[in-house]
């Protein structure tokens, strides 16, 4: 059995980042990964503009204003947002201005409306002296033409989408997403639409893995249930390998008489790199590489137990998908943190043990609470609400309540 860290390294080494790019409408690009660096096409802000509703003035005119001795200026123009000022402000003059509007030539300072009093129709009293250049958002203050804004490999979340829109990128080049074939192996499996006959169970893995792949940024290709029939399984595995970047199959990787996956992978020419990992749950993980001139496919033969399959996805497949997708190394590495465990955590000491539960930030410190009920790899019911896995290292049998534990954040 390979140590978990070694299996992780082998898996990451099998994956090459994708180079294929697709061009997308910006409105459809949320969550996608930028393929090229974006540099600013404009100065931000694009004009000197006002940060307040008020008056544009020359600072020198109003520097001595006080409530007792306000300075009175003539209002010579009104400048709403989106309007090109027509006049240059002269000494003794002001322009009425609104937030976002261009600061007129000649003015260098904005006085907020609350510090003024309008008198007659065309005059304003400045009652409190502003500081020089106050409330002027200067052209190029945030970014200038040619400044790098977003690096290749950036995930496009709302802030990045806003930046792309602001700089006029209505089409954006992103890496194509990995295609991930999912197949469930087992004679006992039926779909959720079927009524269970004796011995049958619902193929929950197909749904769980499709949800996982979507969340990880891949495109799930659900290939359904394949019976424990060697010829049928060979055909399905071979079709999956031909049509995807990754294949996730569940079941058939242990030592049972109907566990055919490893043998078929070898028969199909796969280079089997992982056969078993010292992880609980998830020990019989089988990973193979299929490499042709055109492409590389990484095949994950995941254990059939529902929790084992998901833990293998969270611990290994997630990183592989993230690396393929074009994320930089700092972003595809797992997120670890330390937390206080609220209950005792136990393990058999033989394998690195991943216990599922909930991570919460309570009074400024992270606390991990074990899911209620049995920590059994068949018990998918108590997985609900899981957002973290606590790790008990090999040779450790117990971590007492109140102690610090290493947490994998999901
Ligand atoms: N003699 C041994 N037996 C087992 C060992 C071992 O070391 N020696 N390892 C156990 C461990 S650990 C695991 S994990 C499982 C892995 O089993 P397989 O990957 O071969 O999977 P199956 O035998 O096909 O099924 C196991 C279990 O999972 C259920 N299952 C399968 N597919 C699905 C699905 N799509 N949706 C929901 N549930 C599924 C299946 O009914 C079985 O109960 O092997 C142990 N055995
Ligand atoms: O590795 Mo198995 O996944 O312990 O149940
Ligand atoms: Mg089996």
Image (cartoon, rainbow, N blue to C red):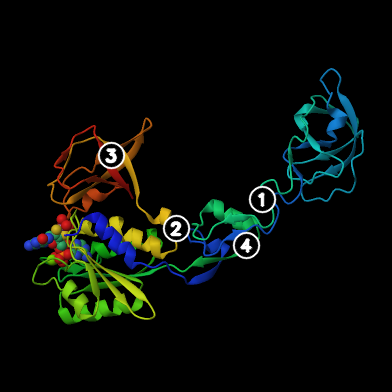
Label 1: element kind: loop
Residue for badge 4: 169
Residue 143: mark = 1
Q: Nearer the viewer, mark 3 or mark 1?
A: 1
- Earlier residue among tags 1 and 4: 1
Q: Relative to 266, is 129 above or below?
A: above
Circles 3, 1 touching at the beta carbon (< 8 Å): no
* Mark 2 to mark 3 CA distance (whole Å): 29 Å
**Residue 323 location (% of width, % of height):** 39, 62
**Residue 22 location (% of width, % of height):** 51, 71
Q: Is mark 3 within 8 Å of ligand 2?
A: no
* Mark 1 to mark 4 CA distance (whole Å): 16 Å
Residue for badge 3: 368
Q: Relative to 35, is 132 above or below?
A: above
Q: Relative to 63, is 100 above or below?
A: below
- Earlier residue among tags 2 and 1: 1
Residue 82 visible in the picture: yes
């Amino acid at each position: 059995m390979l140590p978990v860290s070694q299996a992780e390294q082998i898996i990451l080494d099998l994956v090459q980042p994708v180079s294929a790019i697709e061009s997308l409408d910006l409105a459809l690009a949320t969550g996608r990964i930028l393929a090229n660096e974006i540099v600013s096409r404009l100065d931000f802000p694009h004009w000197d503009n006002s940060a307040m509703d008020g008056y544009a003035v020359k600072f020198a005119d109003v520097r001595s204003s006080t409530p007792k001795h306000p300075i009175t200026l003539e209002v010579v123009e009104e400048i709403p947002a989106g309007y090109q000022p027509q006049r240059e402000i002269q000494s003794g003059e002001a322009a009425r201005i609104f937030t976002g509007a261009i600061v007129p030539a000649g003015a260098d300072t904005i006085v907020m409306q609350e510090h003024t009093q309008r008198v007659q129709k065309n005059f304003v009293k400045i009652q409190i002296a502003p500081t020089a250049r106050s409330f002027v958002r200067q052209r190029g203050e945030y970014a200038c033409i040619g400044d790098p804004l977003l690096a290749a490999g950036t995930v496009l979340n709302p802030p990045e989408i806003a930046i792309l829109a602001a700089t006029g990128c209505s089409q954006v080049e992103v890496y194509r997403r990995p295609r991930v074939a999912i197949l469930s192996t087992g004679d006992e499996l039926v779909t959720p639409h079927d009524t269970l006959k004796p011995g049958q169970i619902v193929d929950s893995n197909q749904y769980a893995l499709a949800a996982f792949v979507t969340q990880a940024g891949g495109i799930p290709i659900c290939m359904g249930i394949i019976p424990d029939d060697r010829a049928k399984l060979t055909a399905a595995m071979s079709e999956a390998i031909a049509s995807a970047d990754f294949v996730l199959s569940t079941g058939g990787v242990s030592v049972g008489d109907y566990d055919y996956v490893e043998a078929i992978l070898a028969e199909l020419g796969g280079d089997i790199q992982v056969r078993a990992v010292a992880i609980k749950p998830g020990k019989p993980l089988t990973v193979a590489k299929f490499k042709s001139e055109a492409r590389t496919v990484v095949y994950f033969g995941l254990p059939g137990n529902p929790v084992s399959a998901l833990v293998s996805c969270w611990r290994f497949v997630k990183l592989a998908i993230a690396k393929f997708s074009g994320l930089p190394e700092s972003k595809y590495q797992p997120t670890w943190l330390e937390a206080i465990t609220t209950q005792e955590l136990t393990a058999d000491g033989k394998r690195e043990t991943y216990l599922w539960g909930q991570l919460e930030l309570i009074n400024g410190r992270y606390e991990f609470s074990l899911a209620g009920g049995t920590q059994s790899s068949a018990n998918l019911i108590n997985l609900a609400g899981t957002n973290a896995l606590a790790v008990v290292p090999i040779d450790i049998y117990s971590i007492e309540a109140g102690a610090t534990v290493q947490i994998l954040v999901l």
